[in-house]
Image (cartoon, helix red, strand yellow):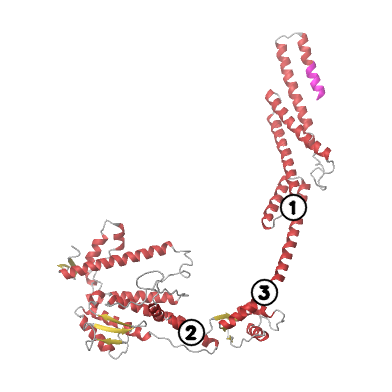
């Protein structure tokens, strides 16, 4: 029923009335427009939230994309086309200002003579549409909507009364248009004919609170989010309809003003898209249509001012740094740090070329394509002579640094190996491995250090095993005897391997004259002897235990003497 009835709030209470067919159709159209508008805004807001960057810089640094369709000139143009063309007039003014006005201001601030390019200033058209002092068309339309009893004819008569002398505005006074509600506006892109029929109805926001209330109670979560219910105010705060109406064009102008403020505060870049044909066919270009779009978008004027102006520009410091090399045989009298403008003048004067058209301003150097090509050519020729010299210096530095790193790495490895400590050897090897990522090299003694590191770790492992055996006190068991016998075999193998290597190369054990046969410590060399004594003691303990056992079993004298002799024999050998 929200589309067929409407509730009016008054001081005395709410009044509900039924709508006729026409009003119900308007309510249905209002719901469709509100749904489309709010859903579009919802999508834009969520996309921006997903693309948001660092919260600290989001407000000051961002990249925005504005898609502009362009001026709309149809056979029947209404309020929608007027708003779109008004937006394009605003954007065209910004383009004119950034392309023409800022260009002229730059030349004037630099004190450079230039040829003025005449371009169309569309500010009078903007005054006609939105001017407050001159009562523009859109403010007059808002006033007509606030009255509540005004018609399109009354609105158009007020527009004619205000702007009948404006050459950019024409009405159908002589009935040369189709209807009496037609009027013309001379836009930047050309003359557009509008039909004022339905302007007031389209400008009113006819979405009732009944529709908003129903949509907010929807079971669909998205719909209820798109139509939030505003807090109801007391009846004494209810305003009259004329004071609380916020028209569509007023909302549009406020949003457009915010957009223009954002664009003005940013560094804009323009990409012009040309529609080649109306049939949307590939490889088909209609010359007249393409030229008309270029003319309407102001591209021709932009090209003209670039041709008559100076498209290439550098600051004095940047120009001096970039083109000082063109006079490679000349020793400059000025330094770029002290007076860059004098350096620029000296660069141009010393060269044997005609740079009379190069303009040296107060802070910038400006010139055209002809001078730019010559400067680039001279710079490339100079770089062909300078770059080989620079490369030779850099390569020499890299080679010396390479040799220094190798000598330093070998010295560090030697010191670590002489210390005989695993942690130091491992540290220098890791450092040399990291340095090899920068310089593709490997120290000559790196392999020797790795071999010594493996040997030292083997001794550490055997030391650890012996310490565990000593602490565990397992010499009185057969299991301990077998374990010590295994370790003893490993120690013998290790010593035998080193002895064979030392015998084959007594003064070059590791394959390098700086590293002889390793001088093991006394503790390491006594491992075999200590281990053998432990094994003998363990075996004697077993025999003595067996003797006591046999004695308790009343063994014969011969067996007892045999066991004692065997025990003494092992003890004497140890």
Residue on which the image places disc 2: 305
Which residue does the image show at 73% across and 15% down from the upper left?
A: 547
Front of the two marks 3 and 1: 3
Label 1 close to label 2 by CB (< 8 Å): no
| Residue at x-position 69% and y-position 23% | 478
Quarter of image, res 87: bottom left
Q: Give the Cα distance between marks 3 and 2.
A: 33 Å
Identify the image quadrant of residue 531.
top right
What residue is shown with label 1? 443
Residue position for label 3: 383
Determine the CA span between mark 1 and mark 2. 65 Å
Is residue 333 within the magenta segment?
Answer: no
Q: SS class of the residue under badge 2?
A: helix
Report the magenta residues as a range: 565-574
Q: Which is nearer the N-term, disc 1 or disc 2?
A: 2
Which disc, if any, is residue 135? none
Q: Secondary structure at mark 1?
A: loop
Q: What x and y, as percent, mark residue 113? A: 53, 90
Q: Considering the whole magenta stretch, tell me its main secondary structure.
A: helix
Percent across and percent down for residue 514 are: 82, 48
Which residue occupies the extreme front position in the image?
Answer: 284
Residue at point 36%, 63% (across, down): 43
């Amino acid at each position: 029923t929200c589309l067929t009835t409407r509730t009016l709030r008054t001081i005395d209470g709410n009044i509900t009335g039924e709508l006729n067919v026409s009003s119900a159709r308007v309510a249905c159209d209002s719901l469709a427009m509100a749904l489309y508008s709010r859903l579009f805004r919802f999508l834009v807001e969520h996309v921006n939230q997903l693309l948001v960057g660092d919260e600290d810089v989001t407000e000051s640094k961002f990249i925005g994309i504005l898609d502009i369709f362009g001026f709309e000139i149809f056979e029947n143009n209404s309020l929608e086309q007027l708003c779109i063309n008004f937006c394009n007039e605003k954007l065209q003014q910004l383009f004119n200002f950034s392309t023409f006005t800022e260009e002229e201001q730059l030349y004037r601030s630099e004190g450079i003579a230039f040829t003025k390019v005449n371009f169309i200033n569309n500010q009078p058209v903007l005054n006609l549409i939105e001017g407050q002092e001159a009562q523009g068309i859109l403010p007059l339309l808002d006033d007509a909507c606030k009255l509540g009893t005004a018609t399109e004819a009354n609105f158009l008569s007020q527009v004619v009364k205000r702007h009948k002398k404006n050459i950019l505005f024409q009405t159908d006074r002589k009935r040369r248009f189709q209807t009496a509600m037609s009027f013309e506006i001379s836009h930047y892109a050309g003359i557009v004919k509008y039909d004022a029929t339905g302007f007031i109805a389209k400008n009113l926001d006819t979405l009732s609170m009944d529709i908003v209330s129903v949509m907010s109670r929807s079971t669909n979560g998205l719909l209820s989010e798109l139509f939030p219910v505003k807090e109801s105010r007391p009846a004494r705060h209810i305003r009259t309809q004329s004071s609380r109406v916020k028209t569509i064009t007023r909302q549009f102008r406020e949003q457009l003003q915010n957009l223009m403020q954002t664009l003005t505060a940013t560094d804009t870049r323009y990409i012009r898209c040309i529609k080649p044909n109306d049939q949307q066919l590939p490889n088909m270009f209609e010359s007249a249509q393409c030229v008309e779009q270029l003319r309407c978008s102001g591209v021709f004027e932009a090209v003209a001012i670039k041709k008559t102006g100076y498209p290439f520009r550098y600051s004095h410091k940047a120009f001096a740094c970039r083109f000082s090399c063109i006079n490679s045989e000349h020793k400059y009298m000025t330094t770029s740090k002290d007076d860059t403008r004098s350096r620029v003048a000296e660069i141009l004067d010393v060269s044997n070329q005609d740079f009379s058209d190069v303009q040296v301003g107060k802070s910038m150097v400006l010139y055209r394509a002809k001078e730019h090509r010559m400067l680039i050519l001279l710079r490339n020729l100079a770089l062909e002579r300078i770059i080989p010299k620079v490369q030779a210096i850099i390569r020499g530095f890299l080679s010396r640094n390479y040799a220094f790193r190798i000598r330093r790495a070998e010295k560090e490895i030697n010191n670590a190996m002489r210390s005989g400590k695993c942690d130091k050897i491992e540290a220098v090897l890791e450092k040399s491995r990291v340095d090899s990522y920068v310089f593709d090299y490997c120290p000559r003694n790196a392999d020797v250090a790795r071999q010594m590191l493996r040997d030292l770790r083997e001794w550490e492992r055997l030391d650890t095993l012996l310490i565990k055996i000593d602490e565990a006190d397992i010499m009185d068991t057969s299991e301990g005897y077998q374990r010590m016998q295994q370790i003893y075999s490993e120690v013998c193998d290790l010593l035998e391997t080193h002895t064979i290597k030392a015998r084959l190369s007594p003064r070059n054990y590791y394959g390098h004259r700086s590293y002889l046969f390793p001088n093991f410590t006394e503790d390491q060399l006594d491992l075999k002897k200590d281990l053998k004594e432990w094994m003998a003691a363990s075996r004697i303990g077993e025999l003595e235990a067996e003797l006591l056992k046999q004695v308790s079993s009343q063994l014969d004298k011969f067996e007892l003497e045999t066991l004692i002799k065997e025990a003494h024999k092992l003890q004497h050998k140890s």
